[in-house]
Amino acid sequence: MKKAIVLLVSLSLLLAVISVSASAWERGTHAFIAHHLKKANGPYDIEEMYGAMAPDAFNYMFTPPGILYRDFLYDQTHHYFLKIQYAVKYGYEKASSYGFISHNDTWGADSTAHHASLTLDPNEGYVITKAKMLDDYLKSVSPDYYNLLKDYPAIALEICHNIVEAAGDIVLVRYDRTLGSKIIQIAARPKTNMQNLMVRAYAKDLYDFSQTTAAPLDSLAAAEQLIRTEENNFRTSCIAYGWLLQQDEATILENVIAEFKNLAAVYLTAVGLPLPDEATLTALLQGAFQAAIGLIENDYLPEIMATINMLKKGMVKEVKPSVMATRPTAALIKGKIK
């Protein structure tokens, strides 16, 4: 059964872990945060949860020409996130946009992972602090890890960063065993909801940016199609990931480690480092995940709950004034009536 699970979700999980530098909280954590913001209920709850995951939809573009646009789209979705709010045309899109905005890396959920923890060192993100701790620990107890990465501190930290993120969702599922089933519900929602918002918000700017690259898109329609294709791929991987999160912890961990082994073959080769033999790599990853879980299992949920409380205030403070600023004033309305 476990081998079947590995085969079923292998591609989706590889996509989920292969983004080495961009993500902060994993998608399960973003879904958990959005669900607890409680902006929407019923069928729109999953729209809000998926909206909170969707800013990472373009993180996995590693082949040409998409790789040329990936960093631009990451910057757009994580720092120019209010474009999504301005793109809302219909009431049913509001929940998606609310979740999307909550993800942002400026003052949103990602900021506590990357820049300013609310429960640990306020001068750096929770994930960064834990990644440094994991790196130090592994170097002290594992000669294989030390010898492989001692001369590459930035690469070591990136690897630990990704392991901490993945471990976070594993720990979070201990507190919410329904998280995976909630994520899967996105399969029952119209695919076009989030796609249409992102097309309206980002297609024109993507087309313009592409003209400055070695692979300019030939039309605005091509930019729109790229966004729809990547969102569809991401949505599919989220559904598979939600299915995995419904399994027992040992099975989740086994699958994630299996895909990190696949990632290691790609990533270490790409950065010019030797790939350890399979037995050594398996032992390294098992030890790293056990250590990561041990480092975060007592304070991960408090950090996430603090992030939720911060966002409940921040979404009111930051989003509503920005949206109101785009609405016509009473004087303008009267002027148009005349």
Image (cartoon, rainbow, N blue to C red):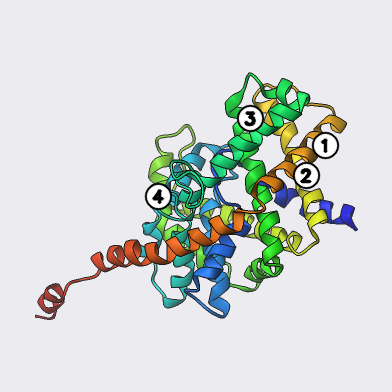
Q: Are marks 1 and 2 in contact (CB under 8 Å)?
A: yes
Q: Quadrant of residue 238?
A: bottom right
Measured as percent of width and height from the top left, residue 68 is found at 51, 36
Which residue bears the numbered disc 1?
Answer: 282
Alpha carbon distance from label 1 to label 2: 8 Å
- Amino acid on which the number 4 mark rests in the picture: Thr
Q: CA distance from mark 1 to mark 3?
A: 17 Å
Under tag 4, what secondary structure? loop
From the image, tell me which residue sits under label 2. 257
Amino acid at circle 2: Ile
Answer whether residue 218 is visible to the viewer in this image.
Answer: no
Q: Give residue 106's mark.
A: 4
Is the Cβ of the residue at disc 3 closer than 8 Å to that at disc 4? no
Q: Could you say whether the residue bearing mark 2 is in a helix, strand or loop?
A: helix
Residue 242 shown left or right of residue 287 in the figure:
left
Name the residue rendered at 60%, 73% in the picture. Answer: 189
Q: CA distance from mark 3 to mark 4?
A: 25 Å
Q: Nearer the viewer, residue 11 or 158?
A: 158
